[in-house]
Image (tube, helix red, strand yellow):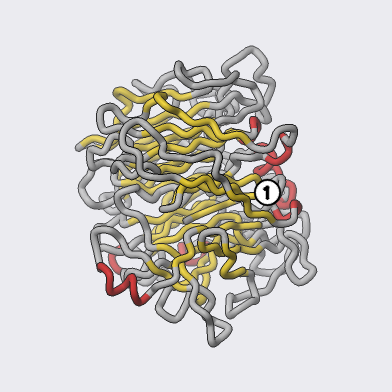
Amino acid sequence: MSAPRAPRLLAAATLAVAPIVALLPHAAAHAAATPHRRPPALTRVAASTGAAMATTAGTRSHARGNSHRAACAGAADLVVAAPYATVDGQARAGAVTLYRGTREIGVLAQGSAGIPGSPERGDSFGSAVVSGDFDGDGCGDLAIGVSEEFAGTPVPDGADGNGIVQLLRGSADGLKPAGTLDVTRLGRPRDTDRFGAALASGDLDGDGDDELVVGIPGLSEGGGVGVFGMKGRDLRAKGTLVTQATPWVAQEHIEGDQFGAAVAVGDFDGDGRAEVAIGAPGDTVGPTTSGGGSVTIADVRRRQAGMYTQNSPGVPGEAEKWDSFGAALAAGDFDRDGRDDLAIGTPGEGLDAFQDGPMYGNGAVHVLYGTRRGLTAIGSEFWSRKTKGIRGKSLNTDRLGSALAAGDLNGDGDAELAIGLPGGNRVLVLAGTRTGGLTANHAVILTGRPGHPGDLYGSAVTINDAGLAVGAPGAGRVTLIPATTRKGSYTGLHPRNTTTLTAPKPALFGFSLTS
């Protein structure tokens, strides 16, 4: 059994070590969303019934056209989770807020507007959020992780939660509750699984609609991932469970690997069917390197998998204790070759002599590039604050790489990469280029409020059509940085024109984001 659930979520924010910070990432990040295939935006329609709160607009660039855009008009372009929000007097029950630009257009919580369940102490509704078009109608749907929910009698401040995922389906009449998922949909009994601690979406089977990928880092055999919606199945039908013990994965595993603490989806070989990247930041590499971390690339359709660690040939550096390789993930086409590339956060990476334990880390990000045969470590990159061209001093409390997001900020067709350093109250943004991928040229460093290290600015990042959103859950703040078209090795960001969204500090508002 792992650490108590209430401290667990708070520690994830404080240390930005992701069962849930990578879901920031993830963000992120519908972290898996590729820049050439942005999911439909979430939108709100004035509801005449309690069940209709928001609807989806926006369509994928390659499908369904303007008729669906008109049917789902009224875009909400940012979703902000506050998993520690007090709801109906229940502390840490959690809430999720929808925004269009800077205007709040809806607040979601369990037990409201038809969403199943009721707000309970410590549920952490919003521990992860992701959007996608799960039914192929051109309207964006929303999945919300509730990783500390108990199906039976709650255990306040006790064991980690069973976890569920709340589904909301987009339509012209609003975002409507569409049921829940839990580990029983994978043929497993409920345990302290933390089902829904990480989420991602993407088209894994090439049928034109998205599948939902659910991280289950507390599953008994070291963690797991559930995949829902394959081959046209309803999202609520039985899913596919992937663990390190799955025969076609076949990895050694122990409790505490946190397999599924971070997930991302990308088409790394460019065949039109995406693969799943699965982070296991607690994985032991070799006989003694506990917490070195690993990332598994799983082709669920073909039932094939391969694993990367910092000891893999071609990957810079070496696995060290507490590195947490794979704590955050983001997929995007950084070199505009039509194949997604993968950024891997390693927030515990020590770059000086003062790496004292798992709470510390200068942090780094590895980038593997996609090829016709999938990801390769040949030519992979290692980014840190010590990389030539990156300004500022690297500190052993920065934890660079705790949050990641990929997306085309400057409108030139290749993706930029946003990297959170919540221990340093900063975000590093690198531009993509078609001539070589990511570059330090014109790199932007965004800084949170001076003198407020507890803000944890950079704990969550996401990219949408308007620019970059940065979460500072310690302060209950989300900063919006606009971006405009600027081709070449520029990020397109305008750091002097920011807008800030706020909520009460204890809510951890901005802990997870999606667009």
* Residue at the right extreme of this rendering: 89
Q: Is residue 504 left or right of residue 40?
A: right
* Number of dots carrying numbers: 1
* Residues packed near mark 1 inside 10 Å, few (<14), some (14 to 19) or many (20 plus): many
Residue 19: image location, x then y, percent: 58, 45
Whether residue 281 is visible here, answered yes or no, is no
Answer above or below: position of 260 versus 450: below
Which amino acid type is shown beneath numbered disc 1?
Answer: Leu
Residue 100: image location, x then y, percent: 51, 63
* Residue at the bottom extreme of this rendering: 48
Answer above or below: position of 278 versus 464: above
Residue 405: image location, x then y, percent: 46, 43
Question: Dot 1 corresponds to which residue?
Answer: 9
| Residue 439: quadrant of the picture | top left
- Tell me which residue sits at (59%, 24%) in the image: 362
- Tell me which residue sits at (55%, 36%) in the image: 420
User: What is the secondary structure assignment of the residue under circle 1?
Assistant: helix
Nearer to the camera, 456 or 121: 456
* Residue at the top extreme of this rendering: 353
Residue 369: image location, x then y, percent: 31, 32
| Residue 17: quadrant of the picture | top right
Whether residue 409 is visible here, answered yes or no, is yes
| Residue 375: quadrant of the picture | top left
- Tell me which residue sits at (56%, 27%) in the image: 363
Nearer to the camera, 352 or 323: 352
Q: Is residue 436 left or right of residue 476?
A: left
